[in-house]
Image (tube, rainbow, N blue to C red):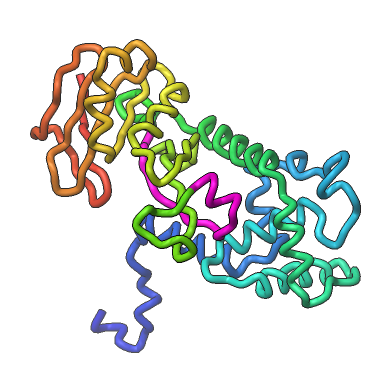
């Protein structure tokens, strides 16, 4: 703009940010958000009834760390990678200060104990409600060829080295006793449209991901499309026992830099890379599956 050389370049606007950049900015905003702001932003997904005090047992008495406050503090810590318990405790202290109430001491022990008392049932209820609410908001226009696409992916996690964890999820046999950590395998089922975790299966380090994938067969609805990077699952998926036990319509096996392989449950025919194939940096998708 030669006629307005003195104007700052920001006055002419900025380039539109992609969806990934927008999500990154939102996640960074959550890192700086107070517990009140986080609770307000997540209210449509996590109703207060799911975080009510228990009738008896853990989180049934009035404490400095009730169940709802502990949940939001824990979620804030998860959304802030690398944050310590002390940083999270400062947010809890700010929550009490804003209400002019006596705030807890700076010792993180009480918060850690309250966090460990969060029941698995409560966390699973929150996860199910969030996933159901996200699924309910998916419009037909967002579907792929009118079908729900569910992504199957696997990962591994380590956990504290305790006798109980070692019995349930033994460490790798290549490591000496006392020199490794218990390790578990996870295979999750995600909605491609919303990113919601719909269901998962867990197993030991010695269980193949294909076996864990089979545990998720019952969570697929008719006409669903399974999108997976587990190559061994394709021949398993097209086998006759599988076809009789599940209602999945199509299975797509995606490998980065390799051919896309898809098989139809009804006809068993294979679809290879073709002009109708669309590729992305993470997954490849088949545009027309007839």
Q: Nearer the viewer, residue 213 or 277?
A: 213
Residue 225 lies within the magenta run: no
Question: In this picture, is 258 found above or below 172?
Answer: above
Quarter of the image that includes the C terminus: top left
Question: In this picture, is 189 found above or below 283?
Answer: above
The answer to which quarter of the image holds residue 87 is bottom right
Residue 36 at what x, y percent from top left? Answer: 72, 60
Give me the residue at 41% from left, 51% from top: 156
**On the picture, is 128 further left or further right than 23?**
right
Give me the residue at 43% from left, 59% from top: 22
Boundaries of the magenta span? 150-169
Quarter of the image that includes the N terminus: bottom left
Give me the residue at 49% from left, 35% from top: 199
Q: Nearer the viewer, residue 158 or 261?
A: 158
**On the picture, is 202 further left or further right than 74?**
left
Question: In this picture, is 210 found above or below 80?
Answer: above
Residue 263 at what x, y percent from top left? Answer: 20, 23
Q: Check the image and name the residue furthest to the front.
A: 177
Q: Check the image and name the residue furthest to the bottom.
A: 6
Residue 288 at what x, y percent from top left? Answer: 20, 26
Give me the residue at 37% from left, 53% from top: 173
């Amino acid at each position: 703009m030669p006629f307005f050389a003195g104007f700052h370049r920001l006055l002419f606007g900025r380039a539109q940010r992609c969806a990934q950049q927008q999500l990154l900015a939102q996640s960074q905003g959550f890192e700086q958000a107070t517990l009140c702001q986080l609770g307000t932003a997540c209210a449509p997904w996590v109703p207060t009834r799911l975080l009510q005090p228990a009738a008896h047992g853990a989180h049934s008495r009035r404490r400095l760390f009730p169940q709802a406050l502990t949940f939001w503090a824990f979620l804030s810590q998860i959304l802030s990678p690398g944050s310590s318990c002390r940083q999270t405790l400062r947010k809890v202290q700010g929550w009490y200060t804003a209400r002019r109430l006596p705030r807890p001491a700076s010792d993180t022990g009480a918060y850690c104990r309250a966090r460990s008392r969060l029941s698995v049932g409560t966390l699973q209820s929150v996860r199910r409600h969030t996933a159901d609410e996200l699924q309910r908001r998916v419009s037909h226009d967002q579907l792929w060829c009118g079908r729900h696409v569910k992504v199957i992916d696997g990962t591994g996690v380590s956990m504290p080295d305790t006798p109980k964890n070692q019995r349930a999820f033994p460490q790798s046999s290549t490591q000496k006793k006392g020199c490794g950590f218990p390790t578990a395998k996870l295979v999750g089922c995600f909605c491609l449209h919303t990113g919601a975790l719909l269901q998962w299966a867990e197993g030991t380090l010695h269980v193949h991901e294909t076996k864990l994938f089979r545990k998720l067969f019952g969570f697929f609805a008719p006409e669903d499309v399974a999108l997976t990077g587990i190559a061994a699952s394709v021949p398993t998926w097209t086998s006759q026992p599988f076809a009789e036990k599940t209602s999945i319509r199509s299975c797509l096996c995606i490998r980065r830099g390799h051919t896309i392989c898809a098989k139809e449950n009804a006809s068993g025919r294979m679809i290879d890379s073709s002009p109708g194939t669309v590729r992305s940096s993470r997954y490849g998708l088949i545009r027309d599956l007839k």
